[in-house]
Amino acid sequence: MTRRQVLGTAAAGALSCPAASPAGAAAAARVRTGFDRLAESGYALLAGARTGVVTNATGVTADLRHIVDVMHADRRVDLRAVFGPEHGFRGTAQAGGSESTGTDPATGLPVHDVYGLRGRELAALFGRAGVDTVVFDVQDVGARFYTYVWTLYECLIAAALAGLRIVVLDRPNPLTGRGAYGPVLERSLASGVGREPLAQAHGMTVAELALLFNADGVPRAAGRAARLETVPMSGWRRTHFFDGTGLPWVPPSPNMPTPDTALAYAGTCLLEGTSLSEGRGTTRPFEIVGAEGVDHRWAAALNALDLPGVRFREAYAVPVFSKFQGRTIGGVQLHVHDRRAYDPVRTGVALLVTARRIWPGFAWRPDLWIDRLAGTAAVRTMTDAGASADDIVEAWQPGLEAFRATREEHLLYG
């Protein structure tokens, strides 16, 4: 029996109690989340535990009840505290922000802001909150630079340092789990948008990432692995896009309104490291991108590349906040017509290469944020040297192949 099968069997054993769904609507969903399965077991993994939960607005059941409300109302769960990541527990804060520590008016539970806290700080906070088990249930979007997985990473380190248990409830990767794409983070460029060597679009779920982190990064940081338990989904396949899961989409952050946004974001967020707008403040963030002075030539240059699965429409917008607030930008809107053929990271690099060629105002952010986002300086230096998108993609293949082999060891789903 493989390690993956042992984990899967252990999880299934812990969740074999045939209790009813928290509402019944979850039974209609094709995919059952980790929380659905935990609740069906009568919260067997949380019996006798002083529990805290790391979650946000995405922590909902299939009938759109929040898991904090559901657990707080159930006498079988001793829920002591809530911890909110970037954007906050209620999801109101913009990029790089969070909600202040306070009290949840619906339950009276303390809500702690944990965005930006590292392992030891987080371990101390868990201690002050009086919890011995930390539950993590947050919807990720499948891109390395989305910070929720790094909150998970720091929670694992904190749990290892403090001797706590961490239970990770799984949710779908909206980009599917078919494979990994893009450059792999170089450790010298570790930051809050990437602490361990993951591919830019990693193709893993949060539970799978927890297993990967706990096998290497956490022991290096904390001196030992965390006491980790994962609760996998049922019914999820690696080929599922989010609209094939039967689950409701709750925006994981203010600029992630739809699963289509997530599909584009895995590549177009690279524009955050440039003088171009990545579309924040428009009606289609990360799908409409551009800048003052960009015109029809960008769409023409991109369409000439004949990138798989996507076409580009000349587009104009007036962002209501962020870059170019209140000013007209020209650019493109991405129209993905074949999701299975579409490679978001290759597309993101093509946007960089063509924008630099056709727009005199193109520049990298002075802090070279592009290197942190890409996880490597090569995207920037090769673009500056006039390399094609295909040349840049080819350059990261050896590192990507090595990551794919490591990734395979921690996958929970066929």
Image (cartoon, rainbow, N blue to C red):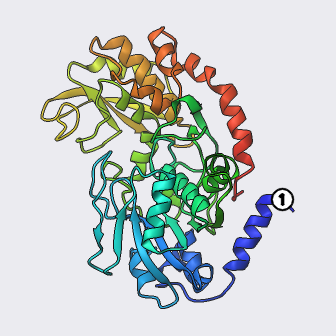
Depth order, front residue of 77/409:
77
Asked if 316 appears above or below 180 in the picture, the reply is above
Q: Is residue 77 left or right of residue 395?
A: left
Q: Position of residue 294 (x, y in %)?
A: 25, 20
In the rendered image, residue 302, in percent from the top left (x then y), is placed at 41, 22
The quarter of the image holding the N terminus is bottom right
Structural crowding at the residue carrying mark 1, measured as other residues with C-alpha within 10 Å and reported as few (<14), some (14–19) or many (≥20): few
In the image, 315 versus 376, the foreground residue is: 376
Quick check: 202 left or right of 68? right
| Residue under the image location 57 percent in, 50 percent down | 176
Compared to 306, does 336 lie above or below? below
Residue indicated by mark 1 = 2
**Residue with the most extreme bottom position:** 75
Of residues 126 and 134, which is closer to you in this image?
126
Residue 238 visible in the shown view: no
Q: Quadrant of the C terminus?
A: bottom right
Asked which secondary structure carries label 1, the reply is loop
Please give the name of the residue rendered at 35% of the width and 32% of the height, measured from the top-left corner. 272
Q: Is residue 350 visible?
A: yes
Q: Residue at x 39, y 37 (%)?
A: 335
